[in-house]
Amino acid sequence: MADTRALDHVGMKPAEGVVTRPSAYGFAATLARLDSALERRQLEIFARFDHSGAARRVGLSMPDTQVVVFGNPKSGTPLMLAAPLVALDLPLRVLVSVDGGQTVVSYIAPSYLAERYGIPPDLVKNIAGIEKIVEEVVA
């Protein structure tokens, strides 16, 4: 099963397969660090969902929350050919949010995706880099 790390001091309820890491930086700085880490690795940002911004536009309030969707077709395509349903969870995504005053970064563990979709072990490396990216972003 995936390594799911919950944060004791944060109000998020753990979800199966989700890894959540506290960031040493504020929300905007964490997003900027994520963008830089993805750019350095030449990973394409396909979409950015600003959930808190959308909430503000309709008169609602929520803590800063954005999802960044990214990847590389050279890495993702072989996964989808081997296990077509993994396309439901690709491209990869990272949630950057503020919970209880702490900026946190969450993602679905590659090991969880591998188990869920039966991804061959030799292809898990294609998505395993998300763990290093997040560690770099939050450190």
Image: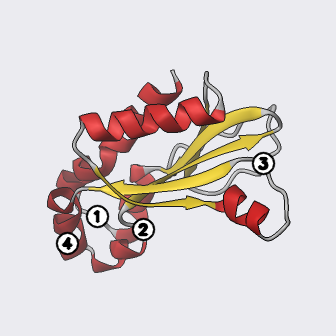
For label 3, the crowd category at 10 Å Cα-Cα, with few meaning under 14, some 14 to 19 and many 20 or more, is some
Measure the C-alpha gap from mark 1 to mark 3: 35 Å
Query: Which one is earlier in the sequence, the residue at label 1 or at label 4?
Result: 4
Residue denoted by label 1? 119
Residue 116, image quadrant: bottom left
User: Where is mark 3, residue-wise?
Assistant: 63
Q: As drawn, which residue projects farthest toward the bottom? A: 84
Q: Considering only order in the chain, which callout, 3 or 1, is on the residue closer to the N terminus? A: 3
Q: Distance between the residues labelled 4 and 3?
A: 38 Å
Return the disc, 4 or 2, that comes first in the chain's sequence: 4
Label 4: state its secondary structure.
Answer: helix
Gap between marks 4 and 2 measured at Cα: 14 Å
Query: Mark 4 or 3, which is nearer the eye?
Result: 3
Q: How far apart are marks 1 and 4 (CA)?
A: 7 Å
The residue sitting at 26% across, 34% down in the picture is 40
Earlier along the polypeptide chain: callout 2 or callout 1? 2
Q: Which numbered mark, 2 or 1, is in the foreground of this view?
A: 2
Label 1 secondary element: loop
Assess disc 4: are there few (<14), some (14-19) or many (≥20) residues with their C-alpha within 10 Å of its C-alpha. some
Kindly identify the amino acid type of the residue bearing the numbered disc 1: Ile
Residue 6 position in % (x across, y down): 69, 40
Along the horizontal axis of the image, is 73 left or right of 9?
A: left
> As shown in the figure, which amino acid type bears the numbered disc 3?
Pro
Callout 1 crowding tier (Cα within 10 Å): few <14, some 14–19, many ≥20: many
Q: Mark 2 points at which residue?
A: 89
What residue is at 20 percent from the left and 72 percent from the top? 82
Q: Which amino acid does label 2 sit on?
A: Asp
The residue singled out by tag 4 in the image is 82
Q: Earlier in the sequence, mark 4 or mark 3?
A: 3
Q: Which residue is drawn at 45% across and 31% down?
A: 33
Question: Measured from the top left, where is residue 79 in percent x and y?
Answer: 23, 66
Question: CB under 8 Å between callouts 1 and 4?
Answer: yes
